[in-house]
Amino acid sequence: MSHLNSTFQFPKRGPKYRPSLSPSTQPARVSSKPSWRRLLFGEDGGPLVELGMVLPMMMVLITGMCAFGLSLNNYIELTSAVGNAGQYLQQTASSTSDPCADVATAMKNIAPNLGKNNISITLTMTNSGGTSTKTDTGTANSFSCSGDKSYLSTGGNITVSATYPCTLAIYALPYGAQIGRSCTLSAQVTEYEY
């Protein structure tokens, strides 16, 4: 026991005691402010820089997919409306007094999300012998041809076609410029009178 007591010394303690360290064993200075050298040449902000580079491209991609999805939905609605309007006119050909108004009403009821002023409708009616054809054009809001019922006859055909404008705008920029393209959706159906 005497051997341990002679070689071991308890460290000095107290608020004023600072051990003297040689320059090679002194701890590194810790500062609350970041060093300019560390900010310029360090790797601490790498993920933030990567996010800043990738985020704009991802946003363009996501909004482009949404714009394309909306245009595809409009196309599906337009195709469904044209098909149903042609079938409706084929079924009611003998009792209708205004075939164009019936087609427009059927299209407005089937495609409620499409702008009624923007749907351009073309109705072509051909008699049974194919000797006379009548074509009427208008918008879904104001489409009438009350005197054309005589073209609806057994053995004839009815062609309903419609167009609807679409814009694949990803981001609208000021002053009317935009990233994207404008397009026109179109659908057509031919029904035969029995």
Image: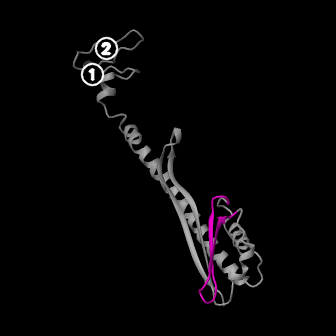
- Dot label at residue 19: 2
**Outermost residue, front side:** 131
For the point 66% across and 80% down, the residue is 87
Q: Quadrant of residue 76?
A: bottom right
Q: Is residue 112 above or below residue 192?
A: above
Q: Nearer the viewer, residue 171 or 42?
A: 171
Quarter of the image for the C terminus: give it.
bottom right
Tell me which amino acid carries mark 1.
Ser
Please tell me whether mark 1 sits on a helix, a strand or a loop. helix
Quarter of the image for the N terminus: give it.
top left
The x, y position of residue 114, in whole percent, is 64, 61
For the point 31% across and 27% down, the residue is 40
Assess whether residue 79 is covered by the magenta stretch.
no
Q: Mark 2 or mark 1, which is nearer to you? A: 2
Look at the image and give the residue range highlighted in magenta.
116-140
The x, y position of residue 24, in whole percent, is 21, 19
- Dot label at residue 110: none
Residue at the disc numbered 1: 2
Assess whether residue 121 is covered by the magenta stretch.
yes
